[in-house]
């Protein structure tokens, strides 16, 4: 059985032909960006637009090969959730998968590339001057804080909220986009609290090397929607700072 969804906004023209169905998508060859033993990502440009094609030939690694949502399904479902929740993300062009008997066969996700963007990890690696621009930094961090809070308010944790999974454009007034979330999921109370700490610790893992302490504090206050720290906030911050101790 095969399921395939093509966003009606892309159904006309070359995109509609290229991404008409799953076999067509697996036949495409673009610029290979990444690959491993279960997936590959290609970049393909047509009619002045660039698309990212992510293809999977296995449900996932380890236990996910056998149980749980296939990784590619989690990717498209989570991006669609972000869009519904008002979290800026890349437009989803098409997605779907086919079964091999009762098991996973193959699947794909196509997203529209956003011109003039970098992921935050790229900015950190090249010590980008924008990370020292207080106005730019405040605008960018406020968006990241509020989007992260929105996820958590929905009982959802990203589970891989690293700087490389957040894009930012090159405008003077920056716009961020959350991408690549195959491990994100909803969690019940106690487990959600742990995952929230992990998400915030992932952001701070790089942030502590590139941001001032006052910037990191402002981020947390934006996230918590408070003007000053409470005793519970201070306890959570200690847990965030300790999360990766001994693992770096």
Image (cartoon, rainbow, N blue to C red):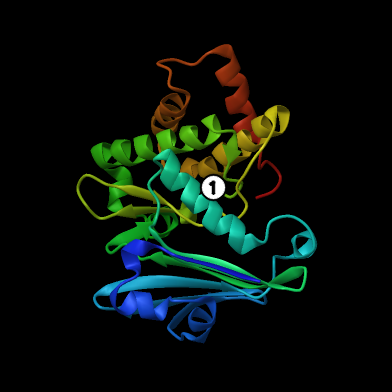
Q: Is residue 226 left or right of residue 192?
A: left
In front here: 36 or 154? 154
Q: Is residue 107 above or below residue 125?
A: below
Q: Which residue sits furthest front?
A: 1
Q: Which residue sits furthest left?
A: 172
Q: Is residue 241 visible?
A: no
Residue drawn at x 59%, y 71% is: 107
How many marks overall? Answer: 1
Find disc 1 in the rendering and name its residue: 161
Residue drawn at x 66%, y 42% is: 244
Q: Is residue 232 left or right of residue 224?
A: right
Q: Is residue 42 above or below residue 185?
A: below
Residue drawn at x 41%, y 33% is: 146
In front here: 210 or 234? 234
In front here: 125 or 193? 193
Q: Is residue 84 above or below residue 64?
A: above
Residue drawn at x 38%, y 58% is: 91
Badge 1: few (under 14), some or many (20 or more) residues near its Cα, within 10 Å? many
Q: Is residue 147 visible?
A: yes
- Image quadrant for the N terminus? bottom right
Give the quadrant of residue 133: top left
> SS at mark 1?
loop
Q: Is residue 122 left or right of residue 182?
A: left
In front here: 29 or 236? 29
Q: Position of residue 53 (x, y in %)?
A: 47, 73
């Amino acid at each position: 059985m095969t399921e395939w969804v093509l966003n009606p906004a892309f159904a006309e023209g070359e995109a509609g032909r290229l991404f008409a169905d799953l076999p067509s998508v697996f036949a495409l060859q673009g610029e290979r960006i990444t690959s491993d033993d279960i997936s590959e990502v290609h970049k393909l440009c047509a009619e002045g637009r660039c698309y990212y094609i992510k293809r999977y030939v296995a449900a996932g690694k380890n236990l996910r090969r056998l149980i749980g949502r296939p990784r590619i399904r989690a990717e498209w479902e989570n991006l669609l959730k972000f869009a519904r929740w008002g979290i800026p993300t890349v437009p989803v062009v098409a997605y779907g998968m086919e079964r091999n008997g009762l098991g996973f066969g193959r699947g794909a996700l196509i997203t529209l590339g956003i011109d003039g963007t970098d992921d935050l990890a790229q900015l950190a690696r090249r010590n980008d001057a924008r990370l020292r621009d207080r106005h730019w930094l405040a605008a960018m961090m406020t968006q990241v804080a509020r989007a992260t809070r929105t996820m958590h308010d929905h009982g959802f944790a990203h589970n891989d909220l690293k700087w490389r999974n957040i894009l930012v454009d090159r405008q003077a007034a920056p716009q961020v986009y959350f991408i690549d979330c195959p491990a994100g999921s909803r969690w019940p109370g106690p487990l959600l609290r742990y995952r929230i700490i992990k998400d915030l610790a992932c952001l701070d893992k790089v942030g502590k090397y590139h941001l001032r302490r006052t910037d990191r504090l402002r981020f947390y206050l934006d996230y918590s929607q408070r003007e000053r720290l409470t005793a519970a906030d201070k306890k959570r911050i200690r847990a965030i700072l300790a999360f990766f101790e001994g693992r770096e």
